[in-house]
Image (cartoon, helix red, strand yellow):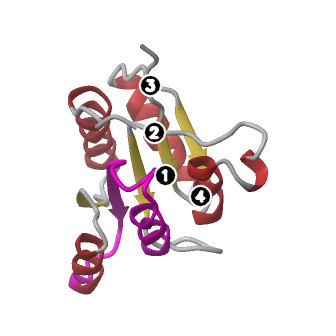
Amino acid sequence: MPINPILLVEDSVDDQTLMLRSFKKHNIANDVLVANDGVEALDFLFGTGIRAENGPVRPAVVLLDMKMPRLNGLDVLERIRGEEKTKTIPVVILTSSDEEQDMLRSYNLGANSYVRKPVDFRDFASAVGELGLYWALRNELPPA
């Protein structure tokens, strides 16, 4: 049985690099697909736009930044939960926002988890590794 990839939706190249290194350090075998914004994330999930030739992807988890250009994370989450074929995909909001309203809106839209990005480099790397281990290896996806 193939391993579902992790879909990392993050506009910061520095954060992308840190997360990819953390996954490697924690021996997470899943491929990691990187979307630089919300539009690219939806292209992966629905097989549209730049991903039309490859078809849709069903990731083990979507790690979703909230503040992004073109389409923000909450709009992406709303679209994921609004479609029958994607509504059961686990979505973890990864954000630097400490606004209570952002957290509440994330959960109200169906986020599975809300994680504030730690400011400290090591804490951030550790948190990402733990997230990857849980969502990619421990969690079981419902049938597509």
Which amino acid, by three-letter code, is at mark 2? Pro
Residue 30, which numbered label? 3
Which label belongs to residue 119? none
Q: Quick one: label 1 or label 4, which is nearer the N terminus?
A: 1
Q: Earlier in the sequence, mark 4 or mark 3?
A: 3
Q: Secondary structure at mark 3?
A: loop
Residue marked by disc 2: 59
**Picture coordinates of residue 131, whole percent (x, y):** 27, 41
Give the CA separation, mark 4 to mark 2.
Answer: 12 Å
Q: Quadrant of the image for the N terminus?
A: top left
Query: What distance separates the C-alpha of mark 1 from that of mark 3?
Result: 18 Å
Q: On residue 42, which mark appears?
A: 4
Label 1 neighbour load within 10 Å: few <14, some 14-19, many 20+: some
Location of mark 1 (residue): 15
Residues at marks 4 and 3, CA–CA distance in whole angstroms: 20 Å
Q: Is residue 56 above or below residue 32?
A: below
Q: Are marks 4 and 3 in contact (CB under 8 Å)?
A: no
In what quadrant of the picture does the C terminus appear? Answer: top left
Residue at the image point whose x is 34% and y is 61% from the top: 93
Q: Is residue 137 magenta?
A: no
Numbered disc in front, either 4 or 3: 4
* Residue stretch rendered in magenta on the structure: 73-100
Of tags 1 and 3, which is closer to the observer?
3
Q: Is residue 104 left or right of residue 65?
A: left
10 Å crowding of disc 2: few (<14), some (14-19), many (20+): many
